[in-house]
Image (cartoon, rainbow, N blue to C red):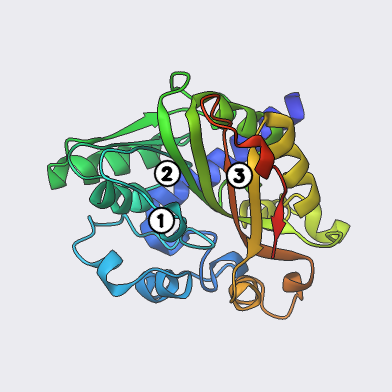
C-alpha cells in the first residue's frame, strides 16, 4: 500500500504541474503524451468529439486538452439532473454539463489535485456559476453522499486509479437507483508490454494504467451495475497514435465509451443484464 501511496502522490504532483502550467503541460491530448505541449487545445478537443459550440464561451484554462473522448455527448443529460464528474480537472466537462442540466440541476466535480480544484473554482467563480461545486477528494473515496447523483461522467481518469474496483464501488454507492455512468476512458485490448507498463510517464500519460476491457466489465458487474455497454470510439486508433507516435500503442489500448446503470428497485431492469460490446 505504501508503494501505491507513493505512486498516487507522483500522479498528483504530475497533474498539479499541469494545473500550474496550463494546457502546455497536459497528458492525454494531441502530442502531449509524447512529451510535446499542446499547441491548440481546441483542435485537440475537436479530435475527441467536442463541437465548436462546446468550446464557445468556455472559462479560461477550462479546456486543458485532457481527455480521450467526450462523455457529455453520450450522457443524455436532462434539466434538473445532478451530475458528478470523476477527475474534473479544470472543470471543462463540468461546465458543459452545467449548460445541459440548467439552473434546476447541479454539477459536482471531484479531483485529488488541490491545484486543479483551485483552478476550477476560480473558473466557476469568475463566470458567476451558482449550480456547480468542486470538491477535493479521491475517486476511490468520493466526498459525496449515498444515492444522490443521477449521472456520473469521467474523461480519461479512471485508468489512472490504482484501485479501480473501489472507484466503481463508490460510483455505485453515490448514484440514485436507476442512475448511470457515462464515461470515456482508455482500456487495454491486449497485453501491454512491460517496458511501457513500468514507465511512470506512460502511467501519467493514460496508457500504462489501462485495465483490460474484460476486467473493467467484471469490475462493473462486481459493483452491481447492469445494462453495461462498452464500445471503442470510431477514431480511437488516431487518438492513441497522436499520444505515442511510432510506438504502436493503438495495438494494445483503445479509447472506449463505457456506460452502465445502477439497479432501480422500483423497476425490473434485471432482464437486461447483458453486456454490449462494440
Compared with 266, 50 (above or below) is below
Q: Which disc is residue 72 wearing? A: 1
**Of callouts 2 and 3, which one flags the residue occurring earlier in the amino acid sequence?**
2
Q: Position of residue 33 (x, y in %)?
A: 59, 65
User: Circle 1 — which element?
Assistant: helix
**Of callouts 1 and 2, which one flags the residue occurring earlier in the amino acid sequence?**
1
**How many numbered discs, if any?**
3
| Foreground tag (1 vs 2) | 1
Compared with 218, 142 (above or below) is above
Q: Position of residue 36 (x, y in %)?
A: 53, 71
Query: Residue 162: in sight, yes or no?
Result: no
Compared with 28, 120 (above or below) is above
| CA distance for labels 1 and 3 | 16 Å
The residue at the point 66 percent across, 76 percent down is 237
- Of 81 and 145, the residue lying toward us: 81
Q: Determine whether label 1 and label 2 are within 8 Å by CB.
A: no
- Of 52 and 246, the residue lying toward us: 52
User: Circle 2 — which element?
Assistant: loop
Q: Position of residue 234 (x, y in %)?
A: 59, 75
User: Circle 3 — which element?
Assistant: helix
| CA distance for labels 1 and 2 | 13 Å
Q: Is residue 99 left or right of residue 212?
A: left
The residue at the point 55 percent across, 73 percent down is 31
Q: Position of residue 198 (x, y in %)?
A: 80, 51
Q: Which disc is residue 158 wearing? A: 3
| Foreground tag (1 vs 3) | 1
Q: Which disc is residue 88 wearing? A: 2
The residue at the point 46 percent across, 61 percent down is 70
Q: Quadrant of residue 194?
A: bottom right
Q: Residues within 10 Å of mark 1 (few under 14, many from 20)?
A: many
Amino acid at each position: 500500500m505504501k508503494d501505491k501511496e507513493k505512486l498516487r502522490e507522483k500522479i498528483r504532483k504530475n497533474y498539479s504541474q499541469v494545473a500550474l502550467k496550463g494546457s502546455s503541460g497536459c497528458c492525454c491530448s494531441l502530442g502531449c503524451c509524447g512529451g510535446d505541449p499542446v499547441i491548440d487545445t481546441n483542435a485537440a478537443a475537436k479530435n475527441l468529439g467536442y463541437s465548436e459550440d462546446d468550446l464557445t464561451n468556455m472559462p479560461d484554462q477550462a479546456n486543458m486538452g485532457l481527455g480521450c473522448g467526450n462523455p457529455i455527448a453520450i450522457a443524455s443529460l436532462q434539466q434538473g439532473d445532478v451530475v458528478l464528474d470523476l477527475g474534473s480537472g479544470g472543470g471543462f466537462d463540468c461546465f458543459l454539463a452545467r449548460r445541459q442540466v440548467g439552473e434546476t440541476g447541479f454539477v459536482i466535480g471531484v479531483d485529488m489535485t488541490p491545484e486543479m480544484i483551485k483552478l476550477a473554482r476560480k473558473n466557476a467563480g469568475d463566470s458567476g456559476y451558482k449550480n456547480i461545486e468542486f470538491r477535493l477528494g479521491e475517486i476511490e473515496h468520493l466526498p459525496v453522499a449515498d444515492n444522490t447523483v443521477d449521472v456520473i461522467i469521467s474523461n480519461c481518469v479512471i485508468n489512472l486509479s490504482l484501485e479501480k474496483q473501489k472507484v466503481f464501488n463508490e460510483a455505485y454507492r453515490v448514484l440514485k437507483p436507476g442512475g448511470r455512468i457515462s464515461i470515456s476512458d482508455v482500456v487495454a485490448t491486449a497485453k501491454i508490454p512491460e517496458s511501457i507498463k513500468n514507465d511512470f510517464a506512460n502511467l501519467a500519460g493514460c496508457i500504462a494504467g489501462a485495465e483490460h476491457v474484460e476486467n473493467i466489465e467484471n469490475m462493473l458487474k462486481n459493483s452491481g451495475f447492469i445494462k453495461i455497454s462498452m464500445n471503442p470510439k470510431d477514431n480511437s486508433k488516431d487518438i492513441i497514435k497522436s499520444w505515442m507516435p511510432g510506438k504502436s500503442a493503438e495495438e494494445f489500448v483503445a479509447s472506449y465509451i463505457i456506460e452502465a446503470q445502477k439497479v432501480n428497485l422500483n423497476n425490473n431492469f434485471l432482464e437486461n443484464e447483458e453486456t454490449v460490446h462494440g
